[in-house]
Amino acid sequence: MVRLGLACIWLLHFLPLAILSRLGATLGTVLYYVAAPRRRVVLLNLQFCFPDLDESARRKLALAHFRAFARSVFEHGILWWGSKARVQALVKVEGLEHWRNLDGKPVILLAPHFIGLDMGGIRLASEYRLNSVYSRTKDEVFDRLLIHGRTRFGQTTLFARQDGIRPMVKTLKRGEPFYYLPDMDLGIRDSVFAPFFGKPAATITGLSRIAQLAGAVPLRDLSAEMAAAPLTVSVADDAHRPAIPVPQPDRTLVYLFGSLALGATVRLAPLAFRPRPESLLTPKRGA
């Protein structure tokens, strides 16, 4: 089934982007009404993150999310098999001056699991050396394709999360920037609780350990605005970062930065926020 789906995506990537967008919007609308369990998860997470929105507004946002998500599935065909010129036309880049202004310091780009995650990573890797991390799955075919897609321009080393952080730290110390996915909830183990939209949420400690061992500076990356093409990957400047100096001897501040950066990015691009079951977050005992 996975191979059939991937074959369809490969065939469709030859179509113009406008047609892919319409196909994605149609499929997303169907999924919104058919995939009831997933719709409930999305609505629950939107209620958690945006309690000020009424139910009608949340449902409208959820429908737009499903359409954008389905569209991104088809656009992955361009990311994985399209020419470099087509990838660069699909996604424009903003804010690189904030990266360059760090004057050669090791940099971690915080890239949450938004719809445009691969949009930003593959687009940047088409021009710059940019390493990243992934989680191995039980599907070897999908893993091979994921690795191909994210490393296809020859400037990316992709590390498996299961292999630990030491290889990531080594590349950062060599001055190679790192595209890091900080918003995974792996349960209480290897986590601390940091505020996420005003509530304690299990936050993995990898960001703090990597930043301190490598002496790296985290920058927030907004992986794409999904409302229209071309999409956008934006590297946030200091004015948009939480006012917390990082890295710090106190690791809690670095955890806090990661959690607050995610929350700020969700507020900036709620359409691209990809609520998953794990986004419900491990509850803190007694909270």
Image (spheres, helix red, strand yellow):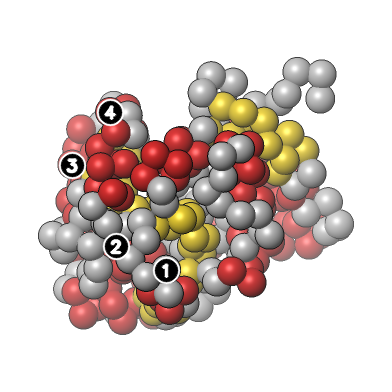
What's the amino acid at mark 1?
Leu
Label 3, label 1: how far apart the Cα atoms are:
34 Å
Of mark 3 and mark 1, the one earlier in the sequence is: 1
Amino acid of disc 4: Asp
| Residue underneath mark 2 | 122
Q: Nearer the viewer, mark 2 or mark 3?
A: 2
Label 4 belongs to which residue? 163
Distance from disc 2 to disc 1, alpha carbons, whole Å, reads 22 Å
Dot 1 falls on a residue whose secondary structure is: loop
Distance of label 4 from label 3 (alpha carbons): 17 Å
Q: Position of residue 185 (x, y in %)?
A: 55, 32
Q: Which residue is mark 3?
A: 144
Specify which label sits upstream in the sequence, 2 or 3.
2
Q: Nearer the viewer, mark 4 or mark 3?
A: 4
Label 3 is placed on what type of residue?
Arg
Question: Residue at left 23%, top 62%?
Answer: 129
Q: Which element is circle 4 on? A: helix
Tell me the residue at 61%/54% (across/down).
245
> Which label sits in the foreground, 2 or 4?
4
- Near mark 1 (Cα within 10 A), the count class, few <14, some 14-19 or many ≥20, is few
Q: CA distance from mark 2 to mark 4?
A: 22 Å
Tell me the residue at 23%/52% (across/down). 174
Which amino acid type corresponds to the residue marked 2 in the rendered image? Ile
Q: Position of residue 231 (x, y in %)?
A: 44, 75
Q: Nearer the viewer, mark 2 or mark 1?
A: 1
Question: Residue 82 placed where, x, y %?
Answer: 20, 69
Q: Is residue 1 visible?
A: no
**Residue 276 quadrant:** top right
- Marked residue nearer the N-terminal end (4 or 3): 3
Q: Nearer the viewer, mark 1 or mark 4?
A: 1
